[in-house]
């Protein structure tokens, strides 16, 4: 067992078994990409809308699930999976289209639930009603790309919605008992040392069920690459990153599900930090520091009361 409440542990406790996720591309775009809010997107967003390992765009959802299952066939030949709508903004479409693709994913015999990545400004009443309906019958969660609560940084990364929008979305999801995961990025340009920590604490106050903590990756052909080339971004060092993660984990209650504490970089397009490609080493370093400092998730939270 890890010193923090991993998604794997959550699955084992809740379903009594290992469950994988299969990443799907529902053919969506994003209001921050299609010109509605901006054409440039968030500065770190890649050409595939932050879903490098998902199924093939344009393919039928059922076929994408089959293809993704083939990729994990050896290590996971017959278990159940969560269908993860990952690329771009997965609630940004007509509600009938959403119903069609979510239902199609749920119709696969090995799919036991859905994870849906979106922006908090793309959860209108009709979408919330659909999610509410699905949530009553299936295991689902929503993923919200908050990244930071620092409003200046949010503007500089071109997130294109204010913090209040996240707060409102969380109230609507909480009202309907729909679980949500908050994405947080460590290492954003112009951020203060404790911004990621404060973002995680804020997300817990808003009722987040889980957090997904990413290291900021500089990917080719993004606005971030231009910032990096202008020498306006200092890449995170591994030790700094590991310390920040341990501090965040120590300050979150143990019941918050930790979906991720590092990123899965696209090896071919990653400019930096290159140390993040050795994911195993990053995870081991986090475990090691937690052990050395005798930290478990929630330790400082308990001490704070
Ligand atoms: S909201 Fe997501 S998909 Fe849209 S630009 Fe930002 S990172 Fe990309």
Image (cartoon, grey):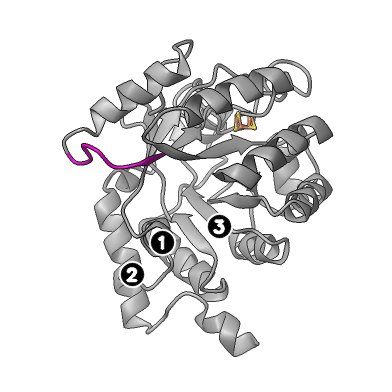
Vertically, is 213 above or below 68?
A: below
Of residues 88 and 55, the one drawn nearer to the viewer in this rendering: 55
Q: Is residue 251 shown left or right of residue 67?
A: right
Identify the secondary structure beneath mark 2. loop
Give the residue displayed 25% in from the left and 53% down from the top: 280
Q: Give the magenta-colored segment's residue range.
A: 75-81
Distance (Cα) linking label 1 and label 2: 7 Å
Q: Earlier in the sequence, mark 2 or mark 3?
A: 2
Give the residue displayed 31% in from the left and 59% down from the top: 283
Magenta stretch secondary structure, dominant: loop
Please tell me the numbered disc located at residue 6. Answer: 1
Q: Is residue 75 shown left or right of residue 7?
A: left
Q: Tell me where residue 56 appears, x and y as whole percent.
A: 41, 16
Distance (Cα) linking label 2 and label 3: 16 Å
Q: Quadrant of the C terminus?
A: bottom right
Task: Examine the image and state in which quarter residue 241 appears.
Answer: bottom left
Q: Is residue 117 shown left or right of residue 266?
A: right
Judged from this view, the residue extending furthest toward the left is 74
Identify the secondary structure beneath mark 3. strand
* Residue of label 3: 210
**1 and 2 marks in contact (CB < 8 Å):** yes
């Amino acid at each position: 067992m890890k010193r923090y409440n991993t998604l794997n542990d959550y699955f084992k406790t809740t379903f009594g078994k290992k469950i994988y996720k299969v990443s799907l591309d529902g053919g969506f775009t994003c209001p921050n990409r299609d010109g509605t809010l901006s054409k440039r997107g968030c500065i770190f967003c890649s050409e595939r809308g932050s879903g490098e390992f998902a199924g093939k765009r344009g393919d039928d959802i059922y076929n994408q699930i089959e293809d993704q299952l083939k990729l994990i066939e050896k290590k996971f030949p017959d278990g159940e999976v969560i269908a993860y709508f990952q690329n771009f903004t997965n609630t940004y479409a007509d509600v009938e289209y959403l119903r069609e693709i979510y239902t199609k994913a749920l119709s696969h015999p090995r799919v036991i639930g859905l994870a849906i990545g979106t922006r908090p400004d793309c959860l209108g009443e009709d979408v919330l009603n659909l999610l509410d309906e699905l949530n009553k019958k299936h295991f689902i969660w929503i993923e919200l790309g908050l990244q930071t609560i620092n409003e200046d940084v949010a503007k500089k990364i071109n997130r294109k919605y204010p913090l209040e929008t996240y707060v409102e979305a969380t109230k609507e999801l909480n009202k309907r008992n729909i679980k949500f995961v908050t994405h947080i990025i460590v290492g954003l340009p112009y951020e203060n040392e404790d911004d990621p920590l404060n973002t995680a604490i804020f997300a817990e106050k808003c009722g987040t069920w889980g957090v997904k903590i990413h290291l900021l990756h500089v990917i080719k052909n993004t606005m971030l690459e231009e910032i990096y080339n202008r020498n306006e971004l200092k890449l995170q060092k591994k030790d700094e990153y590991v310390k920040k993660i341990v501090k965040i984990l120590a300050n979150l209650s143990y019941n918050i599900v930790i979906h991720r504490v590092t990123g899965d970089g696209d090896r071919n397009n990653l400019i930096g930090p290159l140390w993040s490609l050795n994911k195993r080493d990053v995870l081991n370093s986090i475990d090691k520091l937690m052990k050395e400092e005798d930290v478990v998730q929630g330790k400082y939270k308990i001490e704070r009361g």
